[in-house]
Every structure is written in structure tokens, then in C-alpha cells.
Image (cartoon, rainbow, N blue to C red):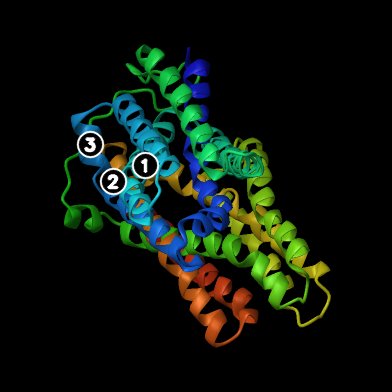
Amino acid sequence: MSTLLLAIIYICFISLGLPDSTLGSAWPAIHAELNVPVSYMGFISMSVSFCTIISALFSDKLIRKFSTRTIVAFSIFLTIIGMAGFAFSNQFWLLILFAIPYGLGAGAIDSSLNNYVALHYSAKHLSWLHCFWGVGTLVGPYAMSYAISSSFGWRLGYIVVGILQIIILAIVLITFPLWKKAKIKGEENNEEVQFAKLTFKQKLSIKGVIFILIAFFAYCSLEQTGMVWASTYFNNAKGLNKETSAALGSLFYIGITVGRFISGFISSKLNDKQMIRLGISIIIPGIILLLLPFDTYILSIIGLIFIGLGCAPIYPCIIHSTPINFGKENSQAIIGLEMAFAYVGTTLMPPLFGVIANYIDIRLYPIYLSIFLIVLIICSELTNKKIKSH
């Protein structure tokens, strides 16, 4: 039964990844049809991110009042409303409106499922969980590409994603009894957990929390900036054409997805702290390769793959270590904060680099990534020091 429940959770994370990558794929067609500037996509993505941050911050209160399974089911329902709304929107303001339920659903399901798996399953499952999110992000653009090439256009893409979400919601509802007791045979942390009721100030006062939040912010800023600006870097800094640059940009996604699959096996030999250090040690040579002042782009390609592979274990291992570092009773509250800080980083830091690239130089891309890597190293080690002295 525990294996079946784990499979359901994996499917839920595919559902989380599916819509994440569809907006970027659909936007060229959407902005042309609705006759709005290309830059308006930022308003939609920021609306989604803002609502995601809000729901992540309140996730611990929701979990205390409702069960994880209820939060997951309702979050998927909200996502379905968002996808349906996108599919039938004929004005730009409607896209902003339907970004609200999509964002609220994404934040709640992300923080609740991450905490559920961190509490009841071993570290390898969190790595594979985020690997399945990567599968969702890879499937979404293909579905949208097929839809745009058909006579129905981009709206069909959102309808297809919405239908897939409906199927996943039905699976979750049918398997509700599996979620009743989190006693997983053969896995660790099987006891029932009563989550503590903490104020925002109490959460931040727990030893090491402020450092892990900054570390998580830095990591997610590095990851998202690395993903978003890779293609533009190859195009503008290395002089490659747009088609080749777009293809090379996908190497980061492939690297992080493959890396998380591999991390699942390695994590049975190493603990979370060692896995995070391993990831950082792989990112370092990747950024160094990007910094080398050579015209050839081959070294940059290798560097980008290294960065993607290095990023792979960091996110899931920070999440998995949260109940161990800060107490199981505090885990949902802290993971909700971690998700919020993550989304702040992914929302604000890539656009900030866009300003830097526009007014200074796109070649500052590896230096910008280096800054977040340094902050990540310092704050993750400070977290370890605080936890050890606790």
C-alpha cells in the first residue's frame, strides 16, 4: 500500500510540473492573439508567484485544520480552475484573474507534499519526487507545441493539461483511504506528527532557520536564473543562433532532472548535509567553466550541464533535512517558509539579472550565479553550525 501511495504522490508532482512550463511555451501565440506586449507575460507569472507565496506561508495553518490529502485534492482542483480559465480567456485581465487559483493551488500542494514525503519517506524519494516534477515540466511544452500546431491553437494545450489534472484529481480522490495513516512499512519516521502552532516570529527564532531560508532563497535564485537566461547567454555572449541557443538552454533542465534521478541512488549512501555539499562541489567547476574567457562555447555547455547536475540534490535534500534539523512538529511551518523564500527568489532574481544584462552586460551571467552560490555555501554551513550547537 505504501508503494501505491508513493506512486500517487509522484503523479501529483507531475501535475505540479505540467502547468509550470506551459505559459512560456504558449505565450508567443497568446500575446499575438490577445494583442498585448510580449513583456506582459511577467504580470501573469508574478501573479502566480505572489499567490504561491501566500499559500505556502499559510500551508502549516491549513494542514493543522485539514489533512494533507484534502489540501492536495483541493489544490489540484484550484489548478484545474486556473487551466480552464486560461483556456477560455479572451482578454488579458482574465489571465491575471485565473492566475490566482493556479498560484494558490501550486503553493499549497508544493509545501504540503514536500513535508509529507520528508516526514514519512527516505531522502531518495524526495529526489525522485522532484525528478517527476521535471518530467512534468518537460511534458508540458510538448503538449502545448502539439496544440499550437493544430487548428485549435494554444487553448487546446491548456484544455489537455486541465484534463490531465482532472484525471490526477480523480486518482487522488479514489485513493483517499491510503492517506489516512502515514505508517509506511520499511520506511523511517512512521509516527503520527502533531504540528506546532507557531507565529512568524517563533518560526524565525528557531536556531538555524534564518540561515536555511537565506540559503534556500540563494539556491532557488541560482537555479531559476540559470534556467531562464541560459539560452540568451549562448545567443548574446557566445554568438550562437537562436535555434541552437534554445536547444542548449534545455541542457540545464535535462541535467537537473537526470541528476535528481541519480541522486536518489546516491542518497542511500550519503546524508542530506553530504548531498548538499556534493551538489555545491559540482556547481563550482560548472561556474568556473562559464567564467573562462574563451570564445568557444563547448566549455560553457559542459559548465551548464555541471551546474544542472550540481543543483539536482540541493533542493530535495534541504527539504528532507528540515524535520531532522528543526523538529518534526515544526517541519510544516518551516517548509512553508522555505517554499515562500524559494518563490521570492525565483520571482525576483531572474528579472533583476534581466535589468543587469540589458544595461550592463549579459556576460555577467556566471558572476551573478557565483554570488548566489557563495551565499548558499555560507548560509548552509552556518545552518549546520547552528544545528550542531543546538
90 up-or-down from 146: above or below = below
The mark that comes first in sequence, 2 or 1, is: 2
Q: Which mark is residue 55?
A: 2
- In primary-sequence order, the first of circles 3 and 2 is 2
Do callouts 2 and 1 mark residues in contact (Cβ within 8 Å)?
yes
Q: Rounded to the nearest whole Å, what is the CA distance between mark 2 and mark 1? A: 9 Å
Closer to the chain start, of discs 3 and 1, is 3
Label 3, label 1: how many angstroms apart (C-alpha)?
A: 11 Å
The x, y position of residue 21, in whole percent, is 54, 48
Kindly state the secondary structure of the residue where label 3 is placed. helix
- Which of the pair 49/121 is nearer the observer? 49
Tell me, yes or no, if residue 178 can be seen here. Answer: yes
Q: Which residue is mark 3?
A: 62
Query: Callout 1, which amino acid?
Result: Ser
Q: Check contact, mark 3 vs mark 2: CB within 8 A.
A: yes
Up/down of 50 relative to 1, above or below: below
Q: Is residue 178 above or below residue 205?
A: above
Q: Residue 259: where, in percent of width, then height?
A: 66, 46
Q: Which residue is mark 1?
A: 111
What SS does tag 1 mark?
A: helix
**Quarter of the rendering containing residue 301:** bottom right
Query: Horizontal and vertical percent for residue 316?
Result: 50, 45
| Distance from the alpha carbon under mark 3 to that under mark 2 | 9 Å
Residue 333 placement, left or right of 374: left
Residue type (three-letter) at the residue carrying disc 2: Ser
